[in-house]
Image (cartoon, rainbow, N blue to C red):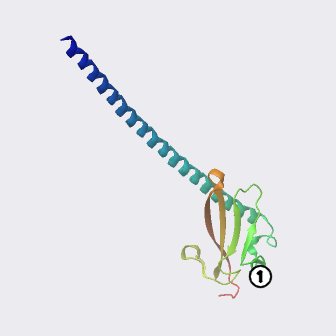
């Protein structure tokens, strides 16, 4: 009876070790999965923050250009003034902006173009179509980039009187 008892204690020890190894493996797998989840959440938060910064800098650029006199504001530049910068795109410099800001004319300057339907309530009003592109680098070592493009339909009186 004593010999049988010693054999049984060894089997219980081996079974306990196997159970500890299985439970440890499950715990390591769960911790690894939660680590990946945390990285995904952090990346999503970084993207959202960069997107908000780009959007805010775009709004800041519009506000800054509106504050300038009509002769200095890129909102009123002609086709020749935009093309002089190369490719019809000019860089905007806004104090405190973290984004790289550029502005382009969809119609290459003030011309008589119809406004989008929701922005053309008055006959004889035409639109100058502008784009502001705001780009921000984010992530570790700024490896990623988010770009926000804002469209502006700038209403103006028709130059042809129509």
The residue nearer to you, when weighing 151 against 25, is 25
The residue nearer to you, when weighing 82 against 22, is 22
What x and y, as percent, mark residue 108? 69, 81
**Image-quadrant location for residue 135:** bottom right
Residue at x 71%, y 56% (from the top left corner):
98
What x and y, as percent, mark residue 91? 74, 68
Mark 1 neighbour density, 10 Å: few (under 14) some (14–19) many (20 or more): few
Q: Is residue 158 left or right of residue 16?
A: right
Q: Is residue 103 left or right of residue 149?
A: right
Residue at x 49%, y 42% (from the top left corner):
35
Q: Residue furthest front?
A: 3
Residue at x 75%, y 62% (from the top left corner):
64
Reply above or below: 35 against 49: above
Q: Is residue 6 left or right of residue 33?
A: left
Q: In which quadrant is the N terminus drawn?
A: top left
Count of marks, rendered view: 1
What x and y, as percent, mark residue 104? 69, 74
Reply above or below: 47 against 148: above
Q: Secondary structure at mark 1?
A: helix
The residue nearer to you, when weighing 62 against 25, is 25
Which residue position is annotated with label 1?
Answer: 80
What x and y, as percent, mark residue 30? 41, 39
């Amino acid at each position: 009876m004593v010999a049988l008892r010693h054999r049984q204690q060894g089997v219980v020890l081996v079974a306990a070790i196997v159970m500890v190894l299985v439970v440890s493996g499950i715990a390591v797998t769960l911790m690894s999965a939660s680590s990946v989840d945390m990285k995904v959440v952090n990346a999503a938060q970084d993207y959202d923050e960069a997107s908000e910064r780009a959007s805010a800098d775009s709004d800041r650029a519009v506000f800054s250009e509106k504050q300038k006199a009509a002769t200095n504001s890129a909102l009123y530049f002609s086709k020749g003034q935009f093309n002089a910068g190369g490719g019809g795109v000019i860089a905007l410099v806004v104090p405190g902006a973290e984004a790289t800001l550029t502005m382009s004319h969809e119609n290459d300057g003030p011309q008589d173009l119809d406004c989008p339907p929701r922005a053309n309530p008055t006959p004889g009003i035409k639109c100058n179509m502008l784009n502001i592109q705001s780009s921000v680098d984010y992530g570790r070592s700024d490896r990623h980039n988010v770009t926000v493009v804002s469209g502006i339909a700038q209403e103006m009186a028709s130059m042809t009187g129509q």
